[in-house]
Amino acid sequence: MKPSPIFRYEALIAQSSRLDRFVDLIYVIALAVTLFRWMLLIYNAIICPQPAVGDEIHFLLYLQNIYDNGLVASLQNPIAINYTLLALPFGFVMDELVALRLVNLLLLSFFIYYLFKKDLPHFKYIGLLVLFYTGKVGIFNVGINDALFVISFAILLIEFVGLLRNGQLDYPDLFIISAFLSLTTRPLVVVYFPLILMVLWAVRSYGFHKLFRLKSVIIAFSIVLIHIPSIIENHIPSWDDKTSESDLTWAQRQYLAQLQANSGLRLEGTHPSWEEVRLYIEQQGENSLPKTFVESIFFDWNLTILEFFKDLFYSFKGLLLQTGALTFYFLFGLFKTKTWRENGFLFSFLPLLYALLVFSFIIISNVEWRWYAPAVLLLISSVGHYLKSEGFGTSRVFMVSFSFSTFFLSAVGVYNLLIN
């Protein structure tokens, strides 16, 4: 005798309920491990701070420059003024390195709160992925200005996607402020500039007059104002400048690094000193290295094509380690018809695809994961809408995949932090 339809329906509900409990359990475990990893990161960054490393040394010097010479006198120098000003008041009451790191933790907290206020579907998975990714990418627990650029640019892109979906910006003031901060915080914006132009061109139909309200105008004007001395003196905003030799460029340094790595003279991902770059140019000639990243594309096509495919593979490998199952979500989404039919989904995926292709072309050296961060955070913000639009089975597969990969990679991160 066949079971009644009511019995079969109740059995299906019970099975679905058990599956949901399993999905929720994996999520809770992943969240707990991810938060524990962040506790360790905060301990090393703030409570028992580790010494400054890498680019942090530059930003400590920028902050000290203001303390020694005063704000007005320092504005003509390339001191990454947007970020340095945020850390300035904290530096009066605490260690300067801790002040720089604290600013980035506050920026991350603000970004998570911003996403929460957006009322995105399945926010708990978005929050989990944001916490996991920002802990892995390593720019929010150190004292560098990447975090300010990443958060500003990510908000700009997320607000634009919201405009495509809903016909309006949720936070017009924040959109304008983020646009000005994106343009004036890091020279990396040059690479992403076509995306910003696309956003601004599309927003024109919304009406720029609706965006410029008194509060946003005052803040935007203030951002521009503090960069005017540097623009007059150096012809660029007050960006961070790690080039110690005024007549040499990072394009030359990175290109030489790749030539030496390919010749077995240097480990991949390391750079020659500025003195080595100068010596190479003196021996090989003034035009032996490209002076700009655009020039590096056309300098040696055989090397460009070789490095493009190598960097593209390396970037996908790195994204898998940095984002877990989000990489497969990205690939899955690119081949879905609805992604290309709905502007909101399409623009959530395209910036990461654009970044992968561009960085693989123009960076003839070690690709750094932090450069992809704005596009990755935009992609994460689309996860909720995608889960909502998929069927029960597919959405649960992604939920479990996100949670399990996050748990596993976070657990590895916890282990590494505890043994070091």
Image (cartoon, rainbow, N blue to C red):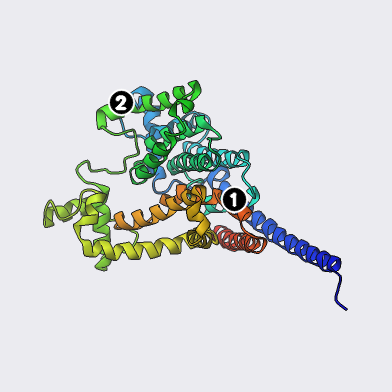
Position of residue 328 in the picture relative to residue 393 (left or right): left
> What numbered label is drawn on residue 385?
1
Q: How many marks?
A: 2
Q: Who is closer to the viewer here, 31 or 382?
A: 382
Spatial CA distance of label 1 from label 2 is 44 Å
Count residues near mark 1 (Cα–Cα under 10 Å), then give few for <14, some for 14-19, many for 20+: some
Q: Horizontal and vertical percent for residue 161?
A: 50, 43
Which residue does the image show at 44% across and 46% down from the upper left?
52
**What residue appears at the point 58 percent right and 43 percent down from the top-left corner?**
47
Q: Secondary structure at mark 1?
A: helix
* Front position among marks 1 and 2: 1
Task: From the top left corner, tell me how far across and down residue 119 is, in percent.
Answer: 63, 41
89 with respect to 116 (left or right): left
Is residue 377 something one can see in this rendering? no
Residue 161 sits above or below residue 213 on the image = below
Q: Amino acid at mark 1?
A: His
Q: Which residue is mark 2?
A: 229
- Quarter of the picture containing the N terminus is bottom right
The local secondary structure at tag 2 comes to: helix
Pick the front one: 215 or 168:
168
Residue 218 in which image quadrant: top left
Amino acid found under the numbered disc labelled 2: Pro
Horizontal and vertical percent for residue 56?
Answer: 42, 44
Q: Earlier in the sequence, mark 1 or mark 2?
A: 2
